[in-house]
Image: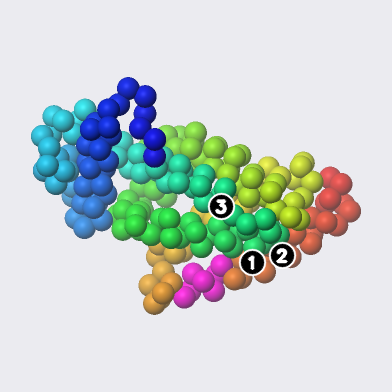
Amino acid sequence: MPKPPGRTEKGERMRETILAAALDLFTTRGYHETTMRDIAAAAGCSPGLSYRYFARKEDLVLAMYAQLAGEFNTTIDALPAAPLVARFSAMMRARFEQVRPYRGVYQAILGSALNPQNELGILGAASAPLRAHVIHDNFAALVRDATDAPPERQVDALALVLYAAHLGLLLFWLCDPTPGFRATETLVRLGEQGLRFGRRLLRLPPIAHA
């Protein structure tokens, strides 16, 4: 990720070190059990220095969200020119791999992440700008650049549906205890079938011309 304007290379490395230490502690110790002092000690810096980069634990999680959103841009750009079902499947498998290093963090904050009233809620107000970017830029591109793309007037609605489906699949994956996440793979394949059926419905005249 490019360093923000005004931040030195050393400063950016320190920020990344603090963030990495925090995410590791959230995974191994628990989000609520970890203090900012713990994070500073794990990062090898003073609490005062850590507060210069992240004033609260919530800021560390929001930084993780932003980092993943930035990486997701690359995921979408790398998708093959293919029908929408194939692009969605490729995106989901890439998304699982992208989020895998943070799986423990998401499990540690799951209650907060699922509460839209919580600052860390994935559907909350604090993450609204990132969410809007992911839906209206990333998922719209997922749909629009498919070889069987629907009419432009259907792109935004379908992007929102696929965004919601991808959140559901990620949640299932986070809780999936099966070896190799076999249950998740089965659910992805069922999702592919559902998307194929939905794409056929979108071609029916009453819907296609709506």
Residue 205 drawn in magenta: no
Reading the image, the residue beneath label 1 is 192
Please give the range of residues in magenta.
Answer: 182-188
Q: Secondary structure under badge 1?
A: helix
Residue 72 lies, in percent from the top left, at: 49, 47
Residue 184 drawn in magenta: yes
The CA distance from mark 1 to mark 3 is 20 Å
Do the residues under discs 1 and 3 have CB atoms within 8 angstroms? no
**Disc 3: CA contacts within 10 A as few (<14), some (14-19) or many (>=20):** few
Residue ID at (46%, 43%): 69
Residue 21 shows in this picture: yes
Main SS of the magenta segment?
A: helix
Q: Is residue 141 left or right of residue 197?
A: left
Q: Secondary structure under badge 3?
A: loop
The CA distance from mark 3 to mark 2 is 22 Å
Residue ID at (71%, 65%): 196
Reading the image, the residue beneath label 2 is 196
Amino acid of disc 1: Glu
**Disc 2: CA contacts within 10 A as few (<14), some (14-19) or many (>=20):** some
Residue 40 lies, in percent from the top left, at: 14, 40
Do the residues under discs 3 and 2 have CB atoms within 8 angstroms? no
Residue ID at (69%, 59%): 82
The CA distance from mark 2 to mark 1 is 6 Å
Which of the two residues, 142 or 29, is positioned nearer the viewer here? 142
Reading the image, the residue beneath label 3 is 78
Which of the two residues, 14 or 65, is positioned nearer the viewer here? 14
Quadrant of residue 178 within the rendered picture:
bottom left
Which of the two residues, 86 or 9, is positioned nearer the viewer here? 9
**Disc 1 or disc 3, which is closer to the eye?**
3
Quadrant of residue 10 within the rendered picture:
top left
Q: Earlier in the sequence, mark 1 or mark 3?
A: 3
Is residue 148 depicted above or below 133 in this figure? below
